[in-house]
Structures are given as structure tokens and as C-alpha cells.
Image (cartoon, grey):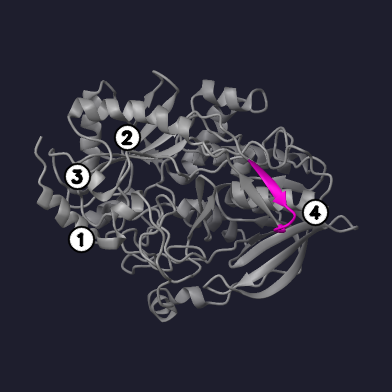
Amino acid sequence: MEISRRRALQAAALLGVSGASAFLSGGRPAAAAPILDPVYRAFVPELWNEPLRAPEHSESIIVGSGFGAAIAARRLTESGSSVTILERGSQWPLDARRQIFANDFAPDGRAFWRRGGLTPLTGLPMVPTDRFGGIFDVTEHGSIDVWRAAAVGGGSLVFTGVMIAPERRFFDSLFGSTVSYDEMDSIYFPRVRSALRLSSMPDDIYASVPFTHSRIWDAQARRAGYSPRRIDGIWNWDVVRAELSGAARPSATIGESNLGNSNGAKFDLTQNYLADAQRTSRARIHARHEVTAVSRAADGRYVLEVDILDPGASVVESRTLTCDRLFLGAGSMGTSELLVTARDTGALPDLNEHVGQGWGTNGDAALVRGMTPEGNGIVQASPSASRIFDESGTPLTLENWYVPGSPIDMSLIGSLGMVLDSTRGEFVYDRAAGKTQLRWPEQGNRYVEEALRAVHDRIAHTSGVGTGFPLLRVPDVNASFTAHPLGGAVLGKATDGYGRVAGYDGLYVVDGALIPGSTGAVNPSLTIAALAERNIEEIIASGR
């Protein structure tokens, strides 16, 4: 097969230092970029609105605003409770025409949380940027980089939108008798699907030019003997159609997703659960309120140390807030760090030995197949159309993905892989450093790479294409990151069967920290959300 080297070099030149090679391979930023606050003020002046000031004392405080936190907020307010929602990131607006968020192939400070020049695929730099309070947080922990969100709406703003329920056998192997799959399948998965209006990609969108790579992905999978299945997502397909017709500024159809979709193409939590909670008038969202420590006073109230931030995520004030009930929804990383620090500094000494344990990556990896002569769609849209499942070895899923960071379609075919992986890390408090750190095995990603490579090579071979992209130093399988951090306060161990933290009444975990490192080779957002629906229903009904 003959591929035009000139075409590849032209693509590389268009990408320059800010393209797919940096996105998928490596490198570190040479220097920080100039401060661009005036530019961001022009694009998104709303970020400079003063955040709503949280009250000194609240009946209930929810830390975070992602899937678990947003669901807890809505259900608590519907039951008559008042809630204070503390979110470290900003409240970003949506606009059909404005570029609210940065894009993947030419990012700026709006992209990254307190980092100058990290890309959203592997945590390695694309171009140097200024330090700002962007929505995408990437932190390095030895051989693994962890992705998470910093914005009102949490991970719903920065994920690829896929929401899938795990198979019963894998769910049961992870949760045992702690959670009934029948209950989840009949009540809570459907409840979330309805609230988030989940659906698979319509045929007219699948057939459009920006999804050429999706059709090629399916064709290659079929040649290897697989039967791709359409997958449900959180996308608003009418907005995607508006992009295709020119009625809305392109976003989803030009590969924007990891750094947010400015036009609301993703039906994120700010448009449903959080909005519904606010409509009750019993929920208030306090953006740029970063919780740094948790303890308990002698009168039983929970005490939170909170930094108030400016739009660049610099601290402008520190406050102490209290509440009667505390719901931790800061994500696996944030919740685990707060709890481990509180236990090991003596602030919450009765937390048990399971706090900080059971953390995993959901077996994540990114995969790339080489350039294909089958077609070119000009750009690659970001919504995922389909997936395949393989259990010829370790059970795993491959999902159709775009190649983030490329302003043109280079005919590279990307996949997101998830392996039923049992490697686990732990959170450890470092007394010398005065902070909690994630400890991850140095070779903890190797098993994931090997399992996915076997399937990926088979698909590439049957279509006569290579893997990776050596010209731009793009690897075939990259498991150096996780977009799905899970665990650290595992359900039934660090908590009871409904997220009540062992040792403390009125303290709850409502997020992905409850999940034991994996959701069975599928994206975890639907499981996190359904567990939150299940758990908060029981907490409200029991009154404790």
C-alpha cells in the first residue's frame, strides 16, 4: 500500500508543534506563554463575575459538581433539603457562536487547570500556555497521568459523552452482593438514561463527512470478524445537526470535546441535574471554592477549609465553612485525597483502613492505527459511534474515537480502549510533603497495553494498515493516562453499601471513589450516576 509522504508531511506541518505528535507521543513545555487574561476576558467575560459567596454554615454541603454530586444535589433539593455546592472550577457559559472553550489543536490557558502547556490526551504538552483556571486538570503520578475536570458540571464537560452499562457478570464480579444488578438494571440505569436523554448516533449524522473516520473504523473492525455496536451518548444530536448545517459554530464536528463544547452539543450536567436542582431554589452553586481540608468540630459539625480563587485559579481568600451533613463528590482523586489526609493528620481519625485503597484506571488506553487510503473526512468529529467487545483473552472494549489535536483528518484511526484490569494503586499521606499522593505501580499499565495491542494488531493486519504513526512518533497503544480514575473510598469497605462513610454519621461519598477501580471494561459515567441515584434515594428515605 502506497501512502503519500508529501501528504503526511503537509499534515505534520499544519499541526506544527501543537499537533497530534505532541498529543500522542511526548515532550515537555519549553516555556510558559504570555499571560492572556485580556484575551480571555474578551472571549468569556462571564468568568470575571464574582462567584456567589458560600454561607458560613449550611445544612448540607456538596463538594464537587460532577455526576455524583449533581445527582445528590437534585434529589436532596427535591426532598426539601437546602444544599451548598462548592466547586473549585469556574462556571462556564455556553454560546452557539462564541468560542467559550479552547480547542484541542491550538489550546490556551482556558484549557488547563494551573498548568502551562499540557495536552488533554496523555498529559504531555502540545504548546506552552499561560497558567489559568482552565477546565482540564492533568496530574502526573509516576507512570500514570490522571485526567479530571475543574469546572461546574465536572467530568460531564470534558468526557467524550459515552455512557454504557456494564455486563451483569462483570458488575457482579466487582460489587459482589453489595449492589444488586437487577435493581440497577431495572431502576437506576433507566432513570439516568431518561434524565440525560441518552441515545445512539442517528444514521444521518453517522453518514456525514465529519464521521468518515467512524465508518472506516467500523469497516476495519468488521474485516477482523467483529460486529460493531452503536453506543449511547450524552450528545444533543440537534445541535450537531445545526453544526453540520451552519446554524451553529462547529464544535463536536471538528473534534472538540476534551476541553469542552462551547455550543452545548454535549448535554452536560449544567443543562439537566444541576439546572433542575437550582430550579427548586434550594441549591446554590459556589464556583471557585476549593476545599483543601475537612475535619469535625466537637459539636458534630463538619468543618471545611476553603480557598476562594480568581479566574486564573490563584487564591484570593481563605475561609472556614461548616455544615451538618457533608457529601463528597470531588471525584475519585479529590475525595480520596481529602479523606486520607483527614484520617492521617488526625482530623477524622476514625476513618478506616480501607480509605485510600482500591484505586484503578478502568484499564484505559488510547490506540492509533496508521494512515488508511479508504477516505478522508477533512476533519474528525468527536462523538463516538460504536464499539466492539473482545474476550479472546482478557475482556476488553474498543470504542471508535477521533484523533484529538488534529485540525485535519490525516486518515489516522483512533480508539479508546478499556480493559478489565485488576491492577490497583493507593493513596498515601506524605508527612514530609504535607499532602496525600497516589502510589501507582511502575509497571501498572503493561497488562493493559499487552491486552489491547493483541486485538489492535489483528484489526490493523486484516485491513493492511500499520499501527501508530512513526512519522510523528505516535505510539500504537498509550496507557500512560487514565480518563476514568476510580476508587479510593470503595463502596462496602470505606463506606457502607450506600456511601455512608464508616465511622462518621452525616458524611457521605457520592462519586467515582466508591467504585473499585473498574466498571467492567466500559466507561464509568453511567455506573457512577446510577449508583448516585440509588444511594441518595436510600439516604433520603432513611433520614441518615
**Foreground mark, 3 or 4?**
4
Residue 432: within the magenta? Answer: yes
- Mark 1 lies on a secondary structure that is helix
Residue at x-position 54% and y-position 36% = 527
Write down the region rendered in magenta: 426-434
Residue type at the position of mark 3: Ser
| Horizontal arrangement in the rendering, residue 20 relative to residue 163 (left or right) | left
Residue 407: within the magenta? Answer: no
Residue at x-position 33% and y-position 55% = 22
Q: Dot 4: within a 10 Å radius of its alpha carbon, few (fewer than 14), some, or many (20 or more) residues?
A: some
Q: Which residue is mark 3?
A: 411
Q: Dot 3: within a 10 Å radius of its alpha carbon, few (fewer than 14), some, or many (20 or more) residues?
A: many
Q: Are marks 3 and 2 in contact (CB under 8 Å)?
A: no
Tell which circle, 1 or 3, labels the residue nearer the N-terminal end: 1
* Res 184 label: none
Residue type at the position of mark 1: Leu
Q: Quadrant of residue 107?
A: bottom left
Disc 2 from disc 1: Cα separation: 29 Å
Residue type at the position of mark 2: Ser
Q: Which residue is mark 2?
A: 386
Tell which circle, 3 or 2, labels the residue nearer the N-terminal end: 2
Q: Looking at the image, is 179 positioned above or below residue 77?
A: above
Residue type at the position of mark 4: Thr
